[in-house]
Image (tube, rainbow, N blue to C red):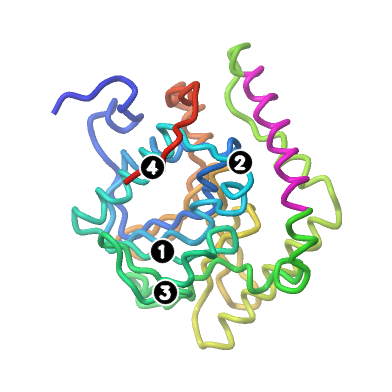
Amino acid sequence: MHQSPASQSLFHERGSKRRYRSVFISDAHLGTRGCRAEFLADFLRGVECEHLYLVGDIVDGWRLKKTWYWDAHHDEVLRLIMKLARSGTAVTYIPGNHDEIFRSWLGLEVAGVKLALQAVHTAADGRSFLVMHGDEFDSVVRYYRFLALLGDSAYTMALGLNRWFNGLRRKLGYPYWSLSQWLKRQVKEAVKAIDRFETALAAEARRHGHHGVICGHIHHAEMRDIGGIAYMNDGDWVESCTALVEHADGRFELLDWAAELRMSHSLPPLPAPEPRLSLPA
């Protein structure tokens, strides 16, 4: 079938797709202007997998309640997920705090996508991993919802600055680079909070007898050993544009999609100029 240039990806230009046993993505925050939906769509076009885990905050219900934003790239991301489900990929959606509205659908299967609060993933080498969004272990979200919403507003402002900054970089011929992520890593308290979060998630996996935990929520892609427990965070598609993948032998790897596009001197198409005013079917 003929494809327009806007629908082609880096992989299609190479004439092949990457095949993984499992793919984990989270924190796309579809419905926000900060979402790098064009990067995520480009990634999804070029992969095939047996298992796809959507590890929360795929759609940002908090933001959509305040301001409606939805463009063609957001549509394309959902279409590609549905296409994977129809092609035989086992798709599991674990809602996060920003798409918590879907937690009322837990246990259902919608268009081939199973909804669950948590999942247990058995890797090819037999290891078991607890898969969860992770907001349950964020004390701000869990106990102080007002502060979480206030922080969300400040974060949205930072992402707006990031969008303006990268728009200028693109006009000057420079690749994407996350200013908002760099700013977050300069705040010592944020670094400490990330460490506490990672330690708590690893302890939860140990408590349930698993070899590791796979999560999202804090927009910080990471793979590290914490007291013999494998902690893996697949990152996000707002700042880092990262995904966690499992190879056929059970080996896990973090993919930095923005970096791969920079190295290949390829960029996905720019976002559509005007948002669409209707949800995709």
**Circle on res. 106:** 3
Separation (CA) of disc 1 from disc 4: 14 Å
Q: Residues within 10 Å of mark 3 (few under 14, many from 20)?
A: some
The number of numbered badges drawn on the structure is: 4
Label 3 vs 1, first from the N-terminus: 1
Contact between marks 3 and 1 (CB within 8 A): the answer is no
The kind of residue tagged 1 is: Tyr
Say which label, 4 or 2, has the lower sequence index.
2
Q: Residue at x 43, y 58 (%)?
A: 24
248 or 51: nearer the viewer: 51
Q: Looking at the picture, does residue 124 appear above or below residue 179?
A: below
Please tell me whether residue 106 is drawn above or below residue 161 in the rendered image.
below
Q: CA distance from mark 2 to mark 3?
A: 26 Å
Kind of residue sitting beneath label 3 = Leu
Task: State which quadrant residue 7 falls in.
Answer: top left
Amino acid type indicated by mark 2: Thr
Taking the spot 42% from the left edge, 77% from the top edge, the residue there is 120
Q: Main secondary structure of the magenta part?
A: helix
Q: Which mark is residue 67?
A: 2
Query: Where is residue 165 drawn, in percent x and y?
Result: 70, 24
Upstream in sequence: badge 4 or badge 3: 4
**What amino acid type should be assigned to the residue bearing mark 4?**
Val
Q: Distance of mark 4 from mark 3, alpha carbons? A: 22 Å
Residue 118 location, x and y as percent? 47, 75
Q: Count neighbours of disc 2 (C-alpha within 10 A) and say few if under 14, some if 14 to 19, many if 20 or more.
A: few
* Bounds of the magenta segment: 151-169
Q: Earlier in the sequence, mark 2 or mark 1?
A: 2
Question: How dense is the environment of label 4, judged by Cα within 10 Å: few (below 14), some, or many (20 and up)?
Answer: many
Name the foreground residue: 83 vs 181. Answer: 83
Please name which of the two marks, 4 or 3, marks the residue nearer to the observer: 3
Quickly name the residue at label 1: 93
